[in-house]
Amino acid sequence: MTFSEKLIRLRKREGLSQEALAEALGVSRQAVSRWEQGTALPDGAKLLPCARYFGVSVDWLLDETQGWEAQAGPAPAAAGKARSLAWIIGGGALAGLSLLGLLLMGILSSVFPAVYTEAPLGAAWVRSYAGLSGFLKVHRLEWLFALCLVTAAVGLWMILRSRLRQAVEKNPVLQSNLTLLPIAAQAGLVYSAAQCLWWIRQGREDYRGALWFSLVPLVLASAWMTWNLMKEKDPVRRRRNSLIELGYCTGQLCIGLLTADGGIGLVGLALNLILCLFYVQWVNPRYMGRRFGRKK
């Protein structure tokens, strides 16, 4: 396995673009491109920092007789399998408990049937809920139902985590856009939660369940964005990116509050999309070292 092949694989493993790696090592993007094309090798002043950056040895980087597995050795490989098994067991337990909770709520709704009726003062409509939805509304358990669904999804992700990672490694387009997915999800969920709050303020209590279905994934998407920030190895860039992303999230929150309080509806959606596209297409590439799309 050549130096260039190892470098490409290491860079993709860390989710770095050529520009980001070049900035971290203090070289030009063209230099990194030449290393990956195999037309040049880094000089002695850059070889050791490159190895330290990826947590590998210089000998392994330069020795073409050593393949990818040699960097970890048998013990780390075994540890990796043990970690994967732990994720699967933990995910299975989490998904099992969540599904058990859903099953219990379904059984209780049959044993203790309940009907929930909405008739807001001054409204020309009356709405009744029976079965599971009525049981949840009478006992105010919509939040628990939403939590069980989300934790079941998290458990399923934990079970499939290793396979998903392998699939991502084989798909360069998806690999290069993992940072984009939570940003887009957060923008949509902020608007969804704001609209639900608006309808609740208008007396539509049936939107409380939808509000929970928006808020819980919104928290998860925000945590994913934070995790992506923590993956940045350069502390200066990590600090700068965190401040920029905090400003973006503050802007989304302000638009959400306007939507929830003022009922601006489609105007809020348009503002939300404009801010998200501006952040993704202009702020990220220009100031945060991120370029969404297929990385070279």
Image (spheres, rainbow, N blue to C red):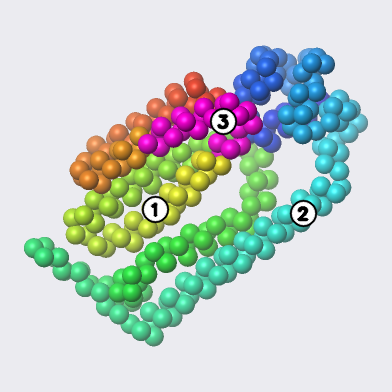
| Residue highlighted by disc 3 | 238
Please identify the residue farthest to the bottom as the structure is shown: 111
| Residue 40 pos. (x, y %) | 79, 14
In the picture, residue 32 is in which quadrant?
top right
Q: Quadrant of the N terminus?
A: top right
- 94, 12: nearer the viewer: 94
Mark 2 vs mark 3, CA separation in Å? 30 Å
Magenta region, residue range: 228-250
Please indicate whether residue 108 sits to the left or right of residue 293 in the image: left
Q: Is residue 173 visible?
A: no
Above or below, 239 against 150 in this view is above
Q: In the rendered structure, does residue 274 fall within the stretch colored magenta?
A: no
| Residue 116 pos. (x, y %) | 25, 74
| Residue highlighted by disc 2 | 81
Question: Badge 3, how many Cα within 10 Å: few under 14, some, many 20+?
Answer: some
Question: Badge 2, how many Cα within 10 Å: few under 14, some, many 20+?
Answer: few
Kind of residue indicated by mark 1: Leu
Using the image, tell me which numbered label, if any, was put on residue 215.
1
Please indicate whether residue 146 sits to the left or right of residue 164 in the image: left
Using the image, tell me which numbered label, if any, was put on residue 86.
none
| Residue 126 pos. (x, y %) | 16, 69
Mark 1 vs mark 3, CA separation in Å? 26 Å
Above or below, 192 against 39 in this view is below
Above or below, 266 against 117 in this view is above
Q: Residue at x 42, y 43 (%)?
A: 186
Kind of residue indicated by mark 3: Arg
